[in-house]
Image (cartoon, rainbow, N blue to C red):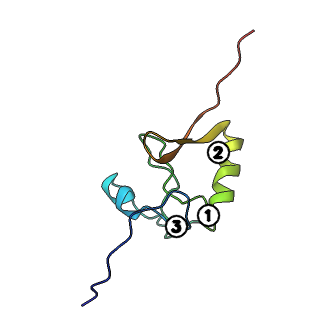
Amino acid sequence: MNMAKKRPFNPFGKGYDIKTAKKAGMKRKASGKNKGHLGSLEPKSGMVLKGMRHKSATQMKAVEELLDNQIKYNPNKGRYYSSPKKRRTK
């Protein structure tokens, strides 16, 4: 029996927050290029599920940039979130 304690998710690390993904009801992709993978963001809140040092975090950030979103750290929640960029009005 494995008695090792699981470490809590570190938003600055290399891991993935599988616990939050499962709680959100996320399912692995059934087919295509990302078959077997879960999404990078929790769908309702935009919470980033990958640590910023995850092997595909750079790719996720690039996709969010293309979607005109920004990834920002919320120090009150201790997590990164994706949200639409604020538009400046004239």
Residue located 44% across and 39% down the image: 76
Give the Cα separation between the discs numbered 3 and 1: 26 Å
* Amino acid at dot 2: Glu
Residue located 51% across and 50% down the image: 48
Q: Residue 90's image quarter? A: top right
Earlier-in-chain disc, 2 versus 1: 1
In this picture, is 58 found above or below 88?
A: below
* Amino acid at dot 3: Ser
**Which residue, as the protein is rendered here, is positioned at the far top?**
90
Which residue position holds label 2? 64
> On residue 53, which mark appears?
1
Which residue position holds label 3? 31
User: Which label lies toward us, 3 or 2?
Assistant: 2
User: Which label lies toward us, 3 or 1?
Assistant: 1
Residue located 46% across and 47% down the image: 78
In this picture, is 20 found above or below 14?
A: above
> On residue 5, which mark appears?
none
Earlier-in-chain disc, 3 versus 1: 3
- Percent x, y of residue 88: 71, 17
- Percent x, y of residue 71: 61, 43
Earlier-in-chain disc, 3 versus 2: 3
Give the left or right position of residue 74, taking residue 23 as reference.
Answer: right
Give the Cα separation between the discs numbered 2 and 1: 16 Å
